[in-house]
C-alpha cells in the first residue's frame, strides 16, 4: 500500500471538562492545538441529571466530573473560538441529551454555522443508564420516546449528526462479560430502531439506521476484546439485514467510538496503567474490519482522581504514535482467515445470539431492565471473586505487590483538584443569567415545551426555542419530570443470599455471633448520597454483606444526606456505609455526619468508600468516619471483617 493509500486515522479525542465552561474551553483549545482532532465533552452530574448548579442535590457536585452547563451562556463560553461547523463533537449526555443538543445547535446558529453541516454525537442511551451509570431522569418508555425525538429531528435537520450512541462501555464497567456487552447493547439498539421505524417513511429508514452509532469498551484481554469488536460488526450487519431489511451495506456498517477500560485501572502502582491503556487500545485499532472511528483514552491516574492536562496529553500522544509513527494504517485486516480469531468470534456471536433471544422472549430491552441489571451485578461479583482468590492476576494488586514509589505522583498528589470556590462562582453566574433574561419569553418557551411534552409531540424544536429564550437546564428537565414522571432503577441486589458463599464460613459465623450479642441481625445500611450514579462498588459491598449474613438496606443511587440519616433511624442501623465516586465526598459526608449528630445517632459507625486521596481520607476521619476505603481495598472480605469488628458490643465496651 502506497503512502497515498494509507487509511485515515481515527478521530483522536480526550474525554474532558471540569470546573467551569471557561476553564473547559481553555482545555479544549489547548488539546486541539496539541493535535486532538475531535472534542469529547464531559458534563458534571447536575447537568447530566437535569439540575441547575444551585439545586440542593447539586451541592458538592458542581464542576467535579465534568463541566456545568446551565444555559445558553454557559454553552456559548464552552465553545468560544471553536468553530462548530468544522468540529466533530461527542457529548456524553443521556437524560438531558435533547436539551444539550438544543443548546449546541443554538450556539452553532449564533456562530453563523450551517446546522445541516454539524458533525458529532450525543450519547442519548438511557437503557444503559438504568443498568450501570445512573444519570436517568424519566421512566424507560418516555425516555425511549425522547431518544427517538432526537433521532427524528436530526435525520431531517442535522443529517450528519449521530443522534444516539448505543453505549456498552458502562456495561463492561459494571461487570458485563463480552457476550453480555454484545447482547445488551444490540438489544438496546433494536429497541430504539423499533421505536423509530414508524416515525419515518419506509424508504428513509435504512439511512436512519446508518446514523446509529455505538460507544464500546475494550478491556485487558485484548484478543477476546478484538474478537468482540469483529463479532459486533457481524451481528449488527446481520440484525439490520435480517430484522429490518436494510440492503445497502453502507447503512449496515458498525460505526463506533471507544474509551478503553477504566475498571481495570489500579490505584496501586498506577504507572502500570499506561501499559494497560496501550494494550487495550490495540484491541480496537489492529483489526481494520473492526477499527474504531474515534478513540479516547483514560489517563494513567484516573484511579487516583481527576487527570491533569499533562496526563491527558500523554494519553493523546499514545494514539498519535500508533496512528502516525507505525505502519498500521498501511495494511488491510491483519486477522482475516485466522482460525483462532474466527473460532473466538463465532463463539462470542453464538453466546450473544442466545442472550438476545432470551431478552426477546422477555419482551425486549425495556422489559428486561431488571433482569439485565441483576445479571450484571452477578457477573461483577464473579469478576471480583476471581481477583480475591488470585485466579485473575492483577499486577501490583494481588501479585508482585512490592514496588518502588511512583515518581509521577508529585507534590500535587498526581491529580488535579477542582477548587471548591468554583461552585459558588457558577451559582453567581447562574443568578446573573436569570436576572438578565426576559421572563416573559422564558415563560412562553416553557409553556410551549410543556404542551409538546404532554401531547406527545417531538420536543426538539421547542427545546431549541427554549434554549434561545434563556431557559435553564433545571427548568427544562423539570418540565420533562412533570410530563413523564421520575424513575428509580433496580439495584440488582436481591434480599436473598446467593450461591457465592464459598469461603465465607468464618465471616458468617462472626456475623452470627455479633448478631446474637446485639439481640438481632447485624443491620448494615449502604447509601449513595449526591448525584453519583456509579453504583458498582455499593452493589458489591451490599451483595457480599448479604452473603455474609448481614441484614442489608440498599435503596440505590441519588439519595440526599437527609434521606440516608432518616433511613438509619427508621431501620435502626448498626453501621452505615457511604459510597461516593464523584469526588464530592468531603461536603456530602460532612452533611451526613452533622445530621447524624443532630438526630442523636452519632454512635452509629460510618464507613466511606470512593476515589479518595490520602489527605481527604484523614479529613474524613477527623469528621468521625471510622474507616475509609479506596480502589486499593479490593478484598471485600477484609471490609466485611472490619464492619463486624466496628459493631461488636465487646469491642465497643472495651473502648
Image: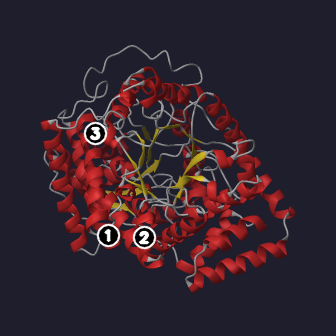
Mark 3 vs mark 2, CA separation in Å: 30 Å
Q: Nearer the viewer, residue 434 or 591?
A: 434
Is residue 282 at least partly visible in the picture?
A: yes
Which residue is identified by label 2? 205
Rendered residue at 36%/40% (across/down): 291
Q: Tell me whether circle 3 and circle 2 mark residues in contact (CB < 8 Å).
A: no
Local packing at callout 1 (Cα closer than 10 Å; few below 14, some 14-19, many 20+) is some
Local packing at callout 2 (Cα closer than 10 Å; few below 14, some 14-19, many 20+) is many
Which residue is identified by label 3? 226
| Above or below for 201 versus 333 | below
Residue at disc 3, secondary structure: helix
Q: Nearer the viewer, residue 646 or 113?
A: 113
Q: Nearer the viewer, residue 186 or 641?
A: 186
Q: Which mark is residue 244?
A: 1
Residue at disc 1, secondary structure: loop
Q: Tell me whether circle 2 and circle 1 mark residues in contact (CB < 8 Å).
A: yes
Rendered residue at 59%/61% (across/down): 158
Mark 2 vs mark 1, CA separation in Å: 9 Å
Residue at disc 2, secondary structure: helix
Is residue 268 at least partly visible in the picture?
A: no
Amino acid at each position: 500500500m502506497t503512502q497515498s493509500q494509507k487509511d485515515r486515522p481515527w478521530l483522536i479525542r480526550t474525554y474532558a471538562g471540569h470546573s467551569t465552561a471557561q476553564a473547559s474551553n481553555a482545555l479544549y483549545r489547548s488539546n486541539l492545538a496539541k493535535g486532538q482532532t475531535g472534542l469529547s465533552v464531559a458534563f458534571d452530574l447536575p447537568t447530566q441529571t437535569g439540575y441547575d448548579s444551585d439545586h440542593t442535590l447539586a451541592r458538592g457536585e458542581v464542576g467535579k466530573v465534568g463541566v456545568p452547563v446551565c444555559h445558553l451562556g454557559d454553552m456559548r463560553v464552552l465553545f468560544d473560538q471553536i468553530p462548530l461547523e468544522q468540529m466533530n463533537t461527542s457529548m456524553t449526555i443521556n437524560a438531558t441529551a435533547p436539551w444539550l443538543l438544543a443548546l449546541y445547535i443554538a450556539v452553532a446558529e449564533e456562530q453563523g454555522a450551517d446546522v445541516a453541516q454539524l458533525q458529532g454525537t450525543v450519547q442519548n442511551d438511557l437503557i444503559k443508564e438504568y443498568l450501570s451509570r445512573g444519570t436517568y431522569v424519566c421512566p424507560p418508555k418516555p425516555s425511549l420516546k425522547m431518544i427517538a425525538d432526537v433521532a427524528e429531528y436530526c435525520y431531517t435537520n442535522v443529517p450528519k449528526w449521530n443522534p444516539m450512541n448505543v453505549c456498552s462501555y458502562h456495561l463492561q464497567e459494571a461487570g458485563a462479560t463480552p457476550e453480555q456487552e454484545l447482547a445488551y447493547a444490540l438489544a438496546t439498539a433494536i429497541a430504539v430502531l423499533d421505536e423509530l421505524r414508524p416515525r419515518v417513511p419506509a424508504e428513509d429508514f435504512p439511512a436512519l439506521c446508518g446514523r446509529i452509532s455505538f460507544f464500546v469498551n475494550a478491556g485487558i484481554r485484548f484478543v477476546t476484546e478484538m474478537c468482540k469488536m469483529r463479532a459486533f460488526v457481524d451481528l449488527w450487519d446481520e440484525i439490520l439485514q435480517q430484522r429490518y431489511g436494510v440492503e445497502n451495506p453502507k447503512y449496515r456498517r458498525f460505526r463506533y467510538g471507544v474509551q478503553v477500560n477504566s475498571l481495570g485501572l489500579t490505584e496501586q502502582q498506577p504507572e502500570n496503567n499506561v501499559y494497560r491503556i496501550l494494550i487495550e487500545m490495540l484491541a480496537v485499532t489492529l483489526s481494520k474490519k473492526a477499527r474504531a472511528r474515534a478513540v479516547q483514552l483514560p489517563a494513567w491516574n484516573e484511579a487516583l482522581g481527576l487527570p491533569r492536562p499533562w496526563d491527558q496529553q500523554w494519553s493523546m500522544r499514545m494514539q498519535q504514535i500508533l496512528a502516525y509513527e507505525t505502519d498500521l494504517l498501511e495494511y488491510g485486516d491483519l486477522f482475516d482467515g485466522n482460525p483462532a480469531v474466527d473460532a473466538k468470534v463465532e463463539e462470542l456471536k453464538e453466546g450473544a445470539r442466545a442472550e438476545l433471544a432470551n431478552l426477546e422472549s422477555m419482551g425486549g430491552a425495556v422489559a428486561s431492565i431488571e433482569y439485565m441489571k441483576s445479571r450484571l451485578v452477578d457477573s461483577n461479583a464473579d469478576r471480583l471473586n476471581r481477583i480475591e482468590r488470585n485466579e485473575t492476576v492483577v499486577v501490583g494488586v494481588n501479585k508482585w505487590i512490592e514496588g518502588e514509589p511512583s515518581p509521577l505522583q508529585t507534590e500535587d498528589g498526581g491529580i488535579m483538584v477542582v477548587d471548591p470556590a468554583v461552585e459558588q462562582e457558577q451559582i453567581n453566574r447562574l443568578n446573573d443569567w436569570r436576572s438578565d433574561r426576559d421572563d416573559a419569553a422564558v415563560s412562553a418557551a416553557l409553556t410551549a415545551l410543556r404542551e409538546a411534552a404532554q401531547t406527545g409531540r417531538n420536543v426538539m424544536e421547542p427545546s431549541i426555542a427554549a434554549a434561545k429564550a434563556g431557559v435553564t437546564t433545571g427548568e427544562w428537565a423539570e418540565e420533562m419530570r412533570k410530563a413523564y414522571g421520575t424513575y428509580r432503577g433496580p439495584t440488582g441486589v436481591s434480599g436473598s443470599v446467593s450461591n457465592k458463599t464459598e469461603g465465607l464460613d468464618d465471616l458468617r459465623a462472626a456475623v452470627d455471633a455479633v448478631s446474637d450479642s446485639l439481640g438481632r441481625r447485624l443491620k448494615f445500611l449502604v447509601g449513595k448520597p449526591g448525584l453519583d450514579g456509579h453504583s458498582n462498588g455499593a452493589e458489591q459491598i451490599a451483595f457480599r454483606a448479604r452473603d455474609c449474613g448481614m441484614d442489608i438496606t440498599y435503596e440505590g443511587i441519588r439519595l440526599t444526606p437527609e434521606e440516608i440519616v432518616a433511613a438509619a433511624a427508621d431501620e435502626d442501623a448498626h453501621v452505615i456505609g457511604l459510597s461516593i465516586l464523584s469526588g464530592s465526598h468531603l461536603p456530602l459526608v460532612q452533611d451526613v455526619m452533622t445530621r447524624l449528630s443532630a438526630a442523636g445517632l452519632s454512635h452509629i459507625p460510618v464507613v466511606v468508600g470512593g476515589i479518595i486521596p490520602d489527605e481527604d481520607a484523614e479529613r474524613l476521619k477527623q469528621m468521625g468516619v471510622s474507616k475509609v476505603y479506596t480502589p486499593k481495598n479490593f478484598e471485600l472480605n477484609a471490609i466485611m471483617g472490619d464492619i463486624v469488628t466496628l459493631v461488636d458490643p465487646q469491642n465497643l465496651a472495651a473502648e
